[in-house]
Image (cartoon, helix red, strand yellow):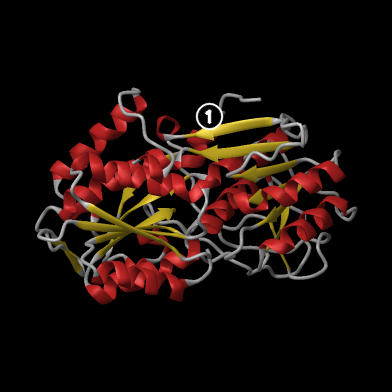
Amino acid sequence: MDRNFDRRAFIKAASAAGIVGLAGCAGGPSEGESTATTAGEDTTEGDEETTAAGTGSGTDEETTATDGSVDGSDVNIAMVYATGGLGDGSFNDQAETGIERAVDEFGLSYQYSEPDSVSQFAEYQQQYASSTDPNYDLVSCIGYLQSDALAETAAQYPEQDFMIVDSVPTTESGDMFDNVAAYTFQEHEGSYLVGQMAGMLTNMDFAAGAGETSPDESVVGFVGGVEGSLIGRFEAGYRAGVAAVDSDIEVQSTYVGSYSDPSGGREAAQAIYESGADVVYHAAGNTGTGVFQAAQETNKFAVGVDRDQSVTLPDYANVILGSMVKRVDTAVFEASEAVVDGSFEGGTAVTLGLEDDGVSLVYGSELGSEIPSEVKTAVDEARQSIIDGEVTVPTDPAEV
């Protein structure tokens, strides 16, 4: 069942920054676990986002809401992150920003786990679901690769509430699980804007920071994590945006097969840059860090994903033109808020796109001001055309 997105919750979350300062809580998985509760101070300056990964103190601390909002101090939430773990400056860190903000606003407690492989998802999900000390009010599953495991777990624990990002698990009959809320995004829409920017810049004589284009080449690239329908939406939107600028621009793409292989990302991007690409866009989690390394080594440009990676990975800000931000933090925060105020609904699916600011192109903190105004104007116009329904963005790279 679809439902309208809570715009009030989104607007609040869209202005939120990461929170630092973690302490511990008890219960949940017995192996490979990390714990976190209670809000620390907001150390964000300007538009920068800060996160803390795996820095729990291991002490128990009762928490209460710090801003006079609904008290969620008796709420416990479990986070099962995607492979690649915290500190990726991208997908998992964006999810962490959402739960940290919920801690800050409501005083809830949470515990998190960082699986090393897909095979561990079911283990962590089920250990949280079966925990009695504490009982978890919600188990948040970050990433579409958890979908199969969650379909099994949700059926085994019908009284446990879950949320998942990037997938809508269904029963054998094709129905949603009554105890699962799903959040998906229109990644192809935001990626179309990235393609517009990359396509225009590769046809220009453009230099900024540590990068420069070779306009005679007219080549751009894409590096994906694990090949499939989700990352295919990133590639499809990107290709369509490039083609809308100039159908003669060559788009080279490759998939590394992992979201946690920076060296593989570096090797893949290097090959694309060496074949003439000026800009490489990645949708590869921590693997994308290697794309930024290759951009610096070849004096070219890159585009990040999920968070403003010019801020989360500042060492590469001099080659990051922008990032296709995906508000995973909003999904995590909204689900947590719903648990606190008693409005959580399983069996629901929320999809966020450009119109909801669920995805967007954010220009890099260092290079954004250098991008020509004509490029930004074209991107703005494309964004509005998609929102108005004048442009339909494909979801399958084969359609471009």
How many other residues sit within 10 Å of disc 1, few (<14), some (14-19) or many (≥20)? few
Residue 259, image x and y in percent? Answer: 52, 63
Task: Judge whether residue 124 can be spotted in this image.
Answer: yes
Residue 32, image x and y in percent? Answer: 74, 70
Q: Residue at x 85, y 53 (%)?
A: 134
> Which residue is farthest right?
132
Closer to the camera in the image, 255 or 357: 255
Q: Which residue is drawn at 52% across and 51% down?
A: 228
Report the amino acid beneath label 1: Arg
Task: Judge whether residue 73 can be spotted in this image.
Answer: no
In the image, taking residue 212 as reference, residue 136 lies left or right, namely right
Closer to the camera in the image, 362 or 214: 214
Which residue is label 1 attached to?
Answer: 8
On screen, residue 156 above or below 50: above
In the image, taking residue 330 as reference, residue 31 lies left or right, namely right
Closer to the camera in the image, 309 or 286: 286
Rendered image quadrant of residue 367: bottom left
SS type, badge 1: helix
Q: Which residue is drawn at 42% across and 47% down?
A: 234
In the image, taking residue 195 as reference, residue 267 lies left or right, namely right
On screen, residue 384 above or below 162: above
Which quarter of the rendering shows the N terminus?
A: top right
Which quarter of the rendering shows the C terminus?
A: top left
Residue 82, image x and y in percent? Answer: 61, 58
